[in-house]
Image (cartoon, rainbow, N blue to C red):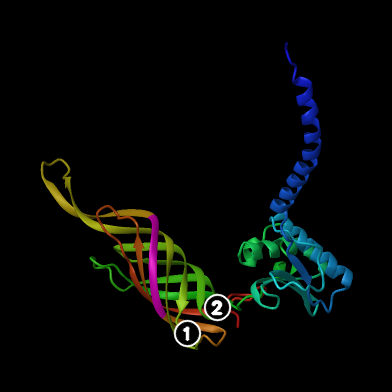
Amino acid sequence: MKINLTYPIKALLIPILICLLPLAAYSQQSSSNTVTHVPASILLIGEHPAISEVDAQSAAVLIAAEFRKLGISVGKPVYETSSTEKIYRVTFRSLGEKILVHLSQENPPGTIIAERQLWISNIEEMIEAAPRLVTALVQNKPIDSTVDMESVTEHEAEKLNKISGESLWNLGIIGTAIPGTDHFAEPGYEFGWSYETPKYAVGTEFRGSFGEDFSFGSWSIGGRYFFNKKNISPYVGGGFSIFGGSYTTIVKKRENRWFSDDYYYYEDHDTVDESGIGAYVVGGISMLRLTKSRLKIELRLDRPYFKIEDQDMMPITIGIFFSQHYIPGRSGCLSF
């Protein structure tokens, strides 16, 4: 006799499954809630005496949204909290027409462990300011490093105050010597323009010296550093130049006499020249710095990056220079 147990087993399993399925679903839901539930951080709206309630709340909502973009769960901004854990706080303070936005992280409340702040010109600029403040705070960056072409505030775009300076025409005479030659104390000249501040100067000049054997001319651009801000100050400097030089040598030549096998010798001049890039260093003393004019005594060494055939040319010059204020629209560079 063959016994069929299929029906009794099915009849027994069905009630068991009906009882266990709700328990399994509840267990899975409880486990899911335990794993994914993370308490949201609190964003407090701090003091905002010059800002309306609506504007302060809207600005705080923008900041909360930026925290969420960076993966930090933040609840709806509130004015008060009983939490003693980590919180974020945003405050607004005015200075004239400017608004200082201050964002801080506190743990416990009242103890700031990180903060960033940014000046804005109006509350509408919170659209650009909110991402920068949150990014700088969360990623521990300077607020200036978060700026880009689309997030520059009006305050940052304002014209910067500059250290005052002055434009000067420069005119001078120089004496030139070239080591290794007989070229010594040959006269020359310099004409140029410079812009000076109390500590620094930049400028450009044309200069040249034209002797019987050696001559050179250059156009240079460089800077100078003054050791003090007084009426008389020593200085040093340097720069680069486009340099051209030439020298003339006396050579003996021979020539056949007419209708004769005899030769005679005579002296002739042979001139060679070259041009290229060079550099220079300079040092000197500037006087009358508190007046509209200047008087300078200067020693300068030029070093071209080339030779004229086998002759090395390295002019050393000493000169005296007069400088006068340049004022746009004034007739003549030396008019007082």
- For residue 228, the mark is 1
Q: Residues within 10 Å of mark 1 (few under 14, many from 20)?
A: few
Q: Which amino acid does label 1 sit on?
A: Asn
- Between the C-alphas of marks 2 and 1, the distance is 11 Å
Viewed as shown, does residue 302 lie left or right of 125?
Answer: left
Q: Main secondary structure of the magenta part?
A: strand
Q: Does the magenta stretch include residue 282?
A: yes
Q: Mark 2 points at which residue?
A: 197
Q: Is residue 248 magenta?
A: no
Q: Residues within 10 Å of mark 2 (few under 14, many from 20)?
A: some
Looking at the image, residue 157 lies above or below residue 199: above
Viewed as shown, does residue 169 lie left or right of 207?
Answer: right
- Position of the C terminus, as image quadrant, is bottom right
Q: For this rendering, which residue is in front, 334 or 15?
A: 15
Q: Where is residue 281 in the image (x, y as percent from the top left)?
A: 38, 69
* View extreme (front): residue: 1
Q: Where is residue 85 in the image (x, y as percent from the top left)?
A: 69, 70
Mark positioned earlier in the residue sequence (2 or 1):
2
Viewed as shown, does residue 221 lie left or right of 162?
Answer: left
- For residue 204, the mark is none
Q: Give the range drawn in magenta.
A: 276-284
- Position of the N terminus, as image quadrant, is top right
Q: Quadrant of residue 67?
A: bottom right
